[in-house]
Image (cartoon, rainbow, N blue to C red):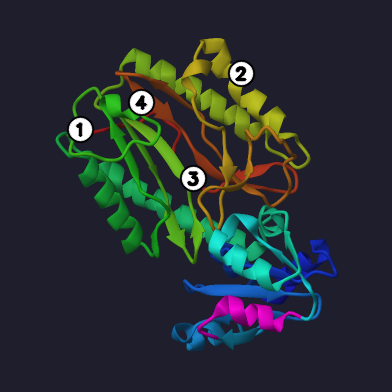
């Protein structure tokens, strides 16, 4: 696994310049190493994982295809391994202190483009299987939770119960801080759970996901506490139409802009575009938010085996908000939703 990913990196590297990887997520992607302190030095001829003695046994177990160097001074050891006066680094993952130190000792220091992040956009079969498992755990947990929610339960209690269910079902951890937002709080896109109790007539927005083997799931559903009011039904129908349009547009070689415009159309028609205040979707993998970002001004095209979210939302201040989100993998001809959960506006409580 590591050798094939490193080989892909070498195809886009400058053949004359070794590459020092310091972003731990990228190190994990390329090598399989899951520790908290490491560097990865890659040239066309060699690959060295540098870490400290705490991880000697772990690194050799996780990275059997890569030469492991144990050191108290990772940057010093990396510089000693260099066979050329040139070195490319990840500018976004290196401190100024380390930059200055390397610059003093390496005559030709270069900042590389985000090469590894570009490789991570397209998932292999192993990655897709793990993301699928995380999604299955997530939605199975929500199925149980929706039967347990009752009036008077606080946002924090609902969030803790959902997280407990995911862990009990095999998640290593939660993918991100669970969002549970009730009543007027549901109009806050990234609300942090509070002690507000669920009340009859509330919208209840739950944005959550499981973490499995380093890979994330991301899903949002919005419920009503008790019977839905007409305005809640209309808002839900609008957001659902937006999400379904976006998912339907996902297919290989389609421009991001086509997907965004398809999803925006129902919101524009209903006069809600100014209440949709965040991006339409993002990549999901070793990070909960990673490339590609579908609303990026840089643009791009959908590619087979991308894993992305589609998550339109409408947020009405002091009243409530609805978001519907799924994690989706792009297939050879269209897409497949991995977070399989009903799209009906479900009543809880």
Q: CA distance from mark 3 to mark 4?
A: 24 Å
Question: Which one is earlier in the sequence, the residue at label 3 or at label 4?
Answer: 4
Residue 187: numbered disc: 4
Screen quadrant of the C terminus: top left
Q: Is residue 304 above or below residue 79?
A: above
Residue bearing the label numbered 1: 198
Residue 340: numbered disc: 3
Q: Tell me the mark number nearer the camera, choosing from 4 and 1.
A: 4
Q: Are marks 3 and 1 in contact (CB under 8 Å)?
A: no
Q: Residues within 10 Å of mark 4 (few under 14, many from 20)?
A: many
Question: Which one is earlier in the sequence, the residue at label 4 or at label 2?
Answer: 4
Q: CA distance from mark 4 to mark 1?
A: 15 Å
Magenta-drawn segment: 71-82
What is the x, y in percent for residue 184?
A: 28, 24
* Residue lying farthest to the front in this orientation: 104
Give the image quarter of residue 181.
top left
Asked whether the viewer can see residue 341, the reply is no
């Amino acid at each position: 696994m590591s050798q094939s990913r490193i080989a892909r990196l070498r195809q886009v590297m400058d053949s004359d310049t070794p590459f020092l990887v310091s972003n731990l997520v990228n190190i994990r992607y390329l090598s399989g190493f899951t520790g908290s302190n490491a560097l990865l030095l890659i040239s066309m001829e060699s690959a060295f994982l540098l870490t400290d003695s705490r991880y000697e046994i772990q690194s050799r177990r996780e990275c059997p295809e890569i030469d492991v160097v144990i050191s108290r001074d990772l940057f010093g050891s990396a510089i000693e391994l260099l066979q050329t006066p040139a070195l490319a680094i990840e500018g976004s993952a290196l401190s100024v202190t380390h930059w200055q130190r390397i610059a003093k000792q390496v005559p030709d220091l270069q900042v590389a483009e985000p090469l590894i992040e570009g490789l991570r956009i397209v998932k292999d079969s192993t990655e897709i299987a793990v993301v699928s498992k995380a999604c299955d755990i997530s939605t199975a947990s929500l199925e149980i939770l929706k039967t347990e929610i009752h009036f008077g339960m606080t946002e924090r209690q609902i969030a803790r119960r959902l997280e407990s269910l995911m862990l009990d079902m095999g998640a290593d951890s939660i993918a991100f801080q669970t969002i549970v937002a009730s009543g007027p709080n549901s109009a806050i896109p990234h609300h942090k759970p509070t002690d507000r109790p669920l009340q009859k007539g509330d919208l209840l927005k739950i944005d959550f996901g499981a973490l499995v083997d380093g890979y994330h799931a991301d899903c949002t559903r919005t419920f009503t506490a008790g019977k839905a009011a007409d305005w809640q039904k209309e808002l839900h129908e609008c957001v659902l139409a937006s999400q379904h349009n976006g998912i339907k547009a996902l297919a290989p070689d389609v421009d991001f802009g086509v997907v965004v415009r398809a999803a925006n159309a129902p919101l524009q028609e209903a006069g809600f575009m100014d209440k949709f205040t965040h991006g339409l979707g993002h990549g999901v993998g070793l990070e909960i938010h990673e490339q590609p970002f579908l609303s990026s001004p840089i643009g791009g095209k959908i590619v087979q085996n991308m894993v992305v979210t589609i998550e339109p939302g409408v947020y009405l201040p002091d009243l409530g908000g609805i978001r519907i989100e799924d994690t989706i993998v792009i297939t050879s001809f269209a897409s497949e939703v991995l977070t399989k959960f009903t799209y009906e506006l479900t009543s809880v409580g």
